[in-house]
Amino acid sequence: MAVTERLYYSDSHLIEFEARVVDLSDRVSGWTAVVLDRTAFYPTGGGQPSDTGTLNGSRVVECIDDGEQGVLHVVQGAAPARSAIVRGRVDWPRRLDHMQQHTGQHILSQAFVTLFNAPTRSFRVLAASCEIDIELDNPTTEVIERAVELANNVIWEDRSITILNVTPDQAAELPLRKEPAREGELRLIEIEDFDLTPCGGTHAYRTGEVGMIAVRSWERAKGLTRIEFVAGTRALADYRKANKSARELAALFSTGRDDAPHLAAQVIEENKELHRRVRALEELAAGVEAEKLLAGARDGVIVQVFDGRDAESLKKLAHALIANPQTIALLGSRDKDTARLVFARSTDASGDMSALMREACAIVDGRGGGKSDMAQGGGKNVGKLDDALAHAAASLTRP
Ligand SMILES: [Zn+2]
C-alpha cells in the first residue's frame, strides 16, 4: 500500500522536488497515473483545484487525492518507470493564484465571523473568480464591503501565517473557526491574531502575499448569501477587465470613465422622452394618413401593407381610420422578421375582426386575436403577409 508524503503540507512554496515512483496505473483517458513516495503537487480538494506541472518533463495535467493510495499524478505523454527517481516541477503561477484565492478565503470568511458572526458554509475556486456561501442575514453591499475592508486591512498588515499540527484533544481546547472534517491529527492554519482553522490546502507565507480582495457580485442563494470574489492576481485581472468595459462605455458617450453611468442614465431618460414625442407625432400623422387612405378607399375598406411599422403605430392608424363611419381597416407591416397585423372596424360597420385575424395569422404562421371590432396579431412568415391580407379582404366580401 502506497502512501505519499505530502510536501505541500509543510511548504507551500516548494515547487521543485525529487521522488521515487512507487506505483503506475493506466487511466481510461489513455494517460498514466503515477504515485510517488513524496510530492509537492496539491491534488483537487477542499474547493481548491489541483496543481499542474511536469514529472521529468512530461505534463502533469491533474492530481487526484486517492486517500490511502496517495496522490495520483495524471501524466500526459511518456510516463516514468516504476522505482525510477523523477524530478517534479509544479506550475508556480497557478499555485500562487490558488494560494491567493484560498488564503484570501480564510481571511474573508473570518472577517464575516468577526464583524457579523456569519460563518462560511462552502467555498469554490472557479475559473476566473471564487465563491463563498455564508450565513449572513440581511446582506447589503455596504455590509459586505465592511467585511472586505477588514479583510484587506488584515492583508496589508502582512500578518504571519503558520501551520500547527495538533491532536484532536489539543484542537478541542482551541477556538477553531470551523469544526474539523476529519479525525486524528489535525493541521491548523493560523493567521496571526486573526484566524485559526483546520485545512489541508496551500496557503501564503504571510497575508501580504494575497495582495487584495475585491467582491465582484453577491446574491441570495438557497437561504445563504453567495459572494463572488477575486484575490491577488485575479483582482488585478478583474480590475483591468472592468476598467476596459467602463472606458469603452464612456467612449460611447464621449466622456470620462467615472461620468459614464450618469450620462448613460441621462441618455436613457432622453430616449424615453423622445419615444413619447414620436408617439404624439404619430397620432397627428395617423390622422393625416387616414384621410389620404380613405380618399382612395373603395366601399370604406382599406387594405394596406407597410414596411417597418410596429404594432403600436399600426393601431394608431387603425384608430384614426375607424373614427370615420362605415370603415374597415385591414393593416399589415413587415417589421424586421415579423409580419404584424391589425384589423379594425368602425362601430357601425359589420364583420368579426377577431375571427378574420385568427385565419390571417394562421397564414403567416403566427397567432392573434382580440374583439369583434379590433384585433391584432402577427407571425414569422413575412413572405405570406400579402396573402393573409388578401384572404381577410376576400372573407369580408363573402356573404
Ligand atoms: Zn485553507
Image: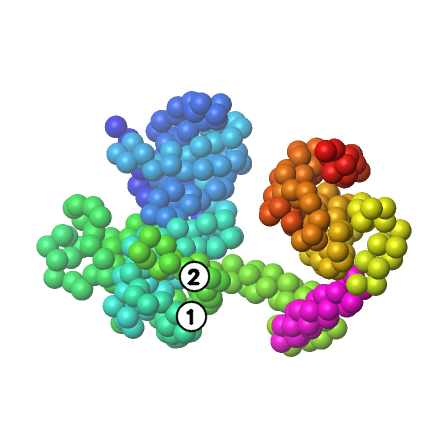
Q: Is residue 318 above or below residue 67?
A: below
Q: Which mark is residue 218?
A: 2
What percent of the width, then of the height, locates residue 88?
45, 40
Q: Name the residue: 37% across, 48% down.
A: 47
In the image, 393 versus 362, the foreground residue is 393
| Cβ at disc 2 under 8 Å from ligand 1 | no
Q: Which mark is residue 141?
A: 1
Marks 1/2: CA–CA distance = 8 Å
| Rendered image quadrant of residue 384 | top right
Q: What's the magenta bit mostly, secondary-structure-wise?
A: helix
The span shown in magenta is: 262-286
Q: Is residue 3 visible?
A: no
What percent of the width, then of the height, locates residue 284?
78, 67
In contact (CB < 8 Å): disc 1 and disc 2: yes
In the image, 203 versus 359, the foreground residue is 359
In the image, 343 versus 76, the foreground residue is 343
